Image (cartoon, rainbow, N blue to C red):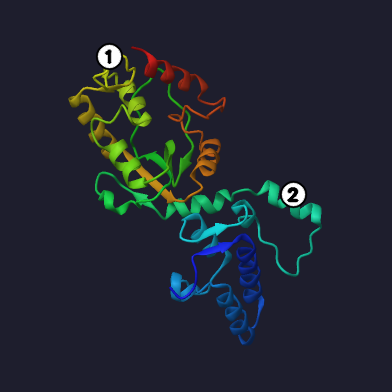
Amino acid sequence: MKGKDTFTSAAINELIRLIELRNEAPSSGQKTIRQKMRDIGFYGKDDWGIVDLQVADLNSLIFSGRIKVVEGDFKKLLTRSVSPIEKVSKHEEEKLLQDSIIDLNFILGQLKNNLFNPQYDSHLALRDKGGVYILCLKENCTLPECYSIPIYKCFEGLKVVYTGIASISLRTRDYKQHFMGNNAGRSTLRKSLGVMFGFKKVPRDKDPNSTKTKFNDEDERQLSAWMKANLIMYTLPTPHYEKIEMLLINHFNPPLNLKGNNNSINKDFRKVLSALRTDK
């Protein structure tokens, strides 16, 4: 690596300013601006393989965790960028920073680029890093009947049923805990789907005082097969998974997200599902 992968927030803001300046500059002036970016420690083509760098490319590197930001709040780096010729008051600038914590459209655009089909794709295709994910029903697939039919929002034309986070590894959390058998005791998603199928819960642990449950081995196998055949996943590696998860829950209102979901739509569905999960 010729440059660096860790920058202060001030350096990132300066890079954003230089990117915008370069986009406005004639070709004769771009070399000088590019050298200023290198003086900061950013080598777009050599280190990151990026030609014709845009602010969105820099945001992507930050969101994916490939570039780390220290000595500042990353939220300030992801606001609507202001052109050098555009004048805003101090009050307007502060409001922009407050109202534009995370760019939802940018997040959704990044998720589109990371499609994972558990029926055919190897789990090695998933990043071994923390992040967020969205689970959708494949085309013409439906959830098991559960007294009422939920109202869905769609992503890429597919019904969103759940969104979650992996604090350490998308590969481990997404695939091994959700799509592999005998894991309903560790996957809230599997627990919800299993009770919707009417599977009987059994103790997860040998400890008689433990309240953790799972399903029997055959039911767990059936559940894994159904999930691989009916669900598809979009992932986004990012160290900012907690903030982004809440944004996705509020945007999509996935019916299987019970925690942190206060949307009045699907409230009755979530109430029934919660009762099924806790019923012994």
Tell me the quarter of the image containing the C terminus.
top left
In the image, farthest residue toward the left:
218
Q: How would you rate the neighbour count of disc 2 (Cα within 10 Å): few for under 14, some for 14-19, many for 20 or more?
A: few
Q: At label 1, which amino acid type do we have?
A: Pro
Q: Determine which of the numbered discs, if any, sits on residue 208 in the image.
A: 1
Residue at image location 25% in from the left, 34% down from the top: 224
Badge 1: how crowded within 10 Å, few (<14), some, or many (20+)? few
User: What residue is shown with label 2?
Assistant: 95
Farthest top residue in view: 280
Left or right? Give the position of 175 relative to 72. Answer: left
Query: Farthest residue toward the bottom?
Result: 28
Q: Which of marks 2 and 1 is in front?
A: 1
- Which residue: 65% across, 57% down? 80
Q: Measuring from the top left, give residue 214's x and y in whole percent.
A: 28, 23
Q: Which of the two discs, 2 and 1, labels the residue nearer the N terminus?
A: 2
Where, quadrant-wise, is the N terminus in this rendering? bottom left
277 to 157, vertically: above or below: above
* Quarter assignment of residue 233: top left
Q: Answer with the quarter of the image where residue 275 lies.
A: top left
Q: Which mark is residue 217?
A: none
Is residue 6 rendered to the left or right of residue 11?
left
Q: Name which residue lies at 64% across and 72% down.
A: 18
Q: In this view, does 75 lie to the left or right of 118?
A: right
Q: What element carries label 1?
A: loop
Where residue 212 appears, as percent x and y from the top left, is 33, 21
Q: Which amino acid does label 2 sit on?
A: Lys
